Amino acid sequence: MPDDDRIPATDLPPGAVRRVGDWAVGNRGAGPDGGDRYFAVSRRCRHQLADLSEGAVDADGCLVCPWHQSRYDVRTGEMVEGPRGFLGYHGPTPGYTQLVRLLGAVARLRVRRASRSGDDVVLD
């Protein structure tokens, strides 16, 4: 398996997101069984194409865009909360946030399965 399909599990503590090839791979933290919940989604935000591998995982397990804080459900790839601001402006932008959120619902992030295999997290 190529190196762009795996990452050492020690590089993905709970809440972390890293770039693995064309994917943003992260760890949502412990699930009901106590094991870490890993995910892989396409790297580009649907708002302004920010690199989501530079984002973070919030308390709800959503991936948060580093530029304007759009939130994505990593299980479905759907944008669950639109951007907070437009370019450098972070005030209300009537209609714009709703438009981007609609785009995020239609043009979801690609989702790929990520799981622990030995000392690595592997993309299936």
Image: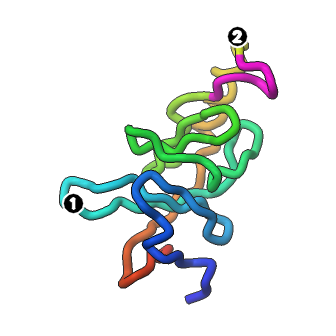
Residue drawn 44% across the image and 72% down it:
10
Instruction: Name the one closer to the observer, 43 or 89.
Output: 89
Provide residue 113's location: percent of width, then percent of height: 45, 66
Name the mark on residue 34: 1
Indicate which label's residue lies in the foreground, 1 or 2: 1
Prevailing SS of the magenta stretch = loop
Which residues are the magenta region? 83-90
Name the mark on residue 85: none
Type of amino acid at the residue the image marks with label 1:
Gly
Q: Which residue is mark 2?
A: 94
Packing grade of label 1 (10 A; few <14, some 14-19, many >=20) is few
Indicate which disc, 1 or 2, sits on the residue closer to the N terminus: 1
Quadrant of res 117: bottom left
Residue drawn 68% across the image and 29% down it:
100
Provide residue 81's location: percent of width, then percent of height: 54, 29
66 up-or-down from 17: above or below: above
